[in-house]
Amino acid sequence: MATFASKVIQFNRQLLFEGDLPKGICIMNPFKENDEIISIVKKFYTQFYNDTNKRKLILGINPGRFGGGVTGIPFTDSKRLIEVCNIKINSVKSHEPSSVFIYDMIHRYGGVEKFYSQFYINSFCPLGFIELNEKNNYVNKNYYDYDDLFQAVQNFIILSLKQQIDFGIDTNVCFVLGKKNAGFISKINEKEKLFNSIVVLEHPRYIQQYKLKEKEKYISAYVEKLKFYN
């Protein structure tokens, strides 16, 4: 029987967006752009998901260029990958605020072994986006920043989500990071009937950027809700 890990690894190996994006928007696909990433993905998911147990789903927005957009592991920058997960990565050095919050929360929950045995994290759109700004720097974009971007990737999002549910996701509840993100997911869920309920949590990036002094309160709220529904 295929393990949860083997299903995730195969999904990432084949993950590809082939549609047309709005002018100026580029997609990030670390599984195709960096030869080291599939080996990192194999190590991570084999370490934490090498079983056939069901898990609850946590969905972010889309990967960022310092986290899952380059490491291939959602909400995990290279520092957390090395220092917490004990997985060496040579081709990427990154620090992402959202990853800091998530791994502080995971520590409070009981550590990576316990957390990943119960939850699977990804993003509503499993691939991220960047755009060249007026200063000639690439910046992260969210799938909902432009209406034509969302329309371009909507079918890809739905198909990818259904494929991930088949890994062995408990669809009784889906945890969603970010209120605006939750609005889009709720509309899709009304149509597709993927989850029985949706629980909204404040997005880690927002907490790290605007509510840092209240971080411990937000971590407690995360842990309380995750444990309540588990």
Image (cartoon, rainbow, N blue to C red):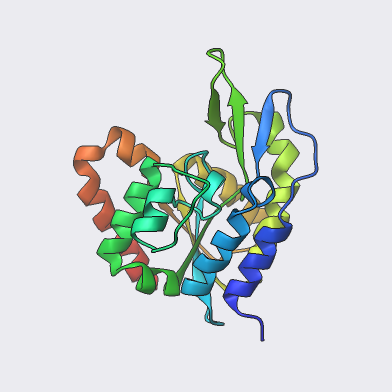
On screen, residue 144 versus residue 102, left or right, reads right
Residue occupying image coordinates x 65% and y 52% = 35
Choose between 171 and 57: the one closer to the eye.
57
Q: Nearer the viewer, residue 189 or 78?
A: 78
Hey, which residue is sitting farthest front in the picture? 90
Q: Is residue 172 visible from the viewing direction of this image?
A: no
Q: Quadrant of residue 178?
A: top left
x and y percent of residue 74 in the render? 50, 53
Tell me if residue 44 comes above or below residue 213 in the rendering. Answer: below
Q: Residue 175, position in %: x, y? A: 46, 58
User: Image height check: is 93 above or below 55?
Assistant: above
Outermost residue, top direction?
134
56 or 78, nearer to the observer: 78
Q: How many marks are shown on the rendered structure? A: 0
At x 57%, y 16%, the residue is 136
Residue at horizontal 38 percent and vertical 50 percent from the top:
79
Residue at left 33%, top 48%? 100
Q: Is residue 164 above or below residue 95?
A: below
- The residue furthest bottom is 1
Question: Residue 45 at what x, y percent from top left?
Answer: 53, 69
Q: Is residue 148 something one can see in this rendering? A: yes
Which quarter of the image is occupied by the C terminus? Answer: bottom left
Quadrant of res 165: bottom right
Place of residue 28 in the rendered image (x, y in percent of width and height, measured from the top left): 63, 40
Residue 18 location, quadrant: top right
Quarter of the rendering occupied by the N terminus: bottom right
The extreme right residue here reads 19
Horizontal relation, residue 78 to residue 141: left or right? left
